[in-house]
Image: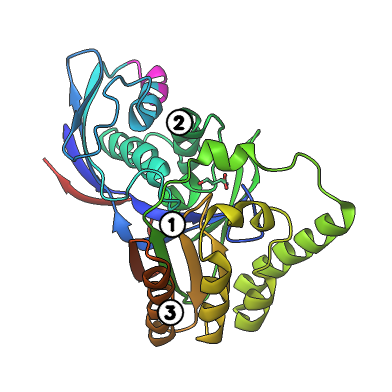
Amino acid sequence: MKKVRVLPPATVANVVCGFDILGFALNEPCDEFEVEITEEPGVRIVNLDEYNLPTDPEKNVSGAAMLAMLEETPDIKGCIIYSKKIIKPGSGIGSSAASAAGVVVGLNHLLGNRFSNADLVRFAMFGEKVASGVKHADNIAPCIYGGVTLIRSIFPLDIVSIDAPPLYATVVHPQIEVRTADARQILRQKVLLKDAIKQWGNIAGLVAGFLKKDYDLIGRSLEDVIIEPVRSILIPGFDEVKKRSKDAGALGGGISGSGPSIFMLSKDELTAKAVAKEMEEVFIKIGIDYHTHVTSINSQGVKIIHSA
Ligand code: HSE
């Protein structure tokens, strides 16, 4: 088998209080990649979308991840990546992670699953480094493992899958650009102890809420006193979206990854749809184009749909 098609899903990183350490995968949207093993050395990238992403593999997110993987696969000379991005770069729902995770999962499949999921996260993080200048795994890990993941440590990698009750996610993506590198740049480097205490209470509460399937505890714990107050100023309408979503019955939510997307979690699909309507009304009112997604947590991770 020389070629495989994969659908890596969008992901929500941070999950409000867990900056850089929590994330979950969404059932929609997904990118589409094909990975083909070739005799031609190196990585060739063929773009099948309108985003005009770099084709130099060292400057391309999926290319950098693939180069890292090829370093440890001396029996493979090279490969071609056919890239069709559906998840818009810079949207805050893990576009770069989907690019990096998709191709390494694809090649691993062609190699008879030679590498563990943790190895694949390690390779894919080289892609995140290209995208944001920093290796973080809170999009990549859920993209590869599926479900909700906790990155207890990044060096060394320690990833924990967290069982969660059924949850619906509503995501609104206002059509403005927030670069992850910029959204990281503006963060304060020091945290007050009183804020840290609140934050780790919330992270522990959120993880406990997922495991105990306690929706109220999940809702109470979706609070961020450290990152959100700084980053939310980059997203017009943020406070109103949050208030109206909660009034419509959402458990809670906040900035998805580094933004500009905003996500909300709900117990049922009807509420998630009502939340989408509230979000849409806010962006219509302030005159910013938007896309919304009503979806659920993806427990599978990257989907392998076709091999030839
Ligand atoms: N944890 C990262 C951040 C995710 O918030 O900067 C970026 O998608």
Q: Quadrant of the image for the C terminus?
A: top left
Kindly identify the residue that appears in the image at 59 percent across and 78 percent down.
Answer: 213
Distance from disc 3 to disc 1, alpha carbons, whole Å, reads 28 Å
Q: Is there a contact, CB below 8 Å, between mark 3 and mark 1? A: no
Query: In front here: 117 or 5?
Result: 5
Kindly identify the residue that appears in the image at 56 percent across and 32 percent down.
Answer: 134
Q: Is residue 49 above or below residue 194?
A: above
Q: Residues within 10 Å of mark 1 (few under 14, many from 20)?
A: many
Kindly identify the residue that appears in the image at 59 percent across and 57 percent down.
Answer: 232
Q: Quadrant of the image for the N terminus?
A: top left
Left or right of residue 47: residue 266: right
* Residue at the disc numbered 3: 278
The image quadrant of residue 169 is bottom left
Kindly identify the residue that appears in the image at 30 percent across and 19 percent down.
Answer: 56
Whether residue 297 is visible, yes or no, is no
Specify which label sits upstream in the sequence, 1 or 2.
Answer: 2
Q: Residues within 10 Å of mark 2 (few under 14, many from 20)?
A: many
Query: In front here: 76 or 268?
Result: 268
Q: Nearer the viewer, mark 2 or mark 3?
A: 3
**The disc labelled 1 sits on which kind of residue?**
Gly
**The disc labelled 2 sits on which kind of residue?**
Phe
Whether residue 141 is visible, yes or no, is yes
Distance from disc 1 to disc 2, alpha carbons, whole Å, reads 17 Å
Q: Is there a contact, CB below 8 Å, between mark 1 and mark 2? A: no
The image quadrant of residue 65 is top left
Specify which label sits upstream in the sequence, 3 or 1.
Answer: 1
**The disc labelled 3 sits on which kind of residue?**
Glu
Q: Which residues are magenta?
A: 68-74
Specify which label sits upstream in the sequence, 2 or 3.
Answer: 2
* Residue extending furthest toward the left: 308
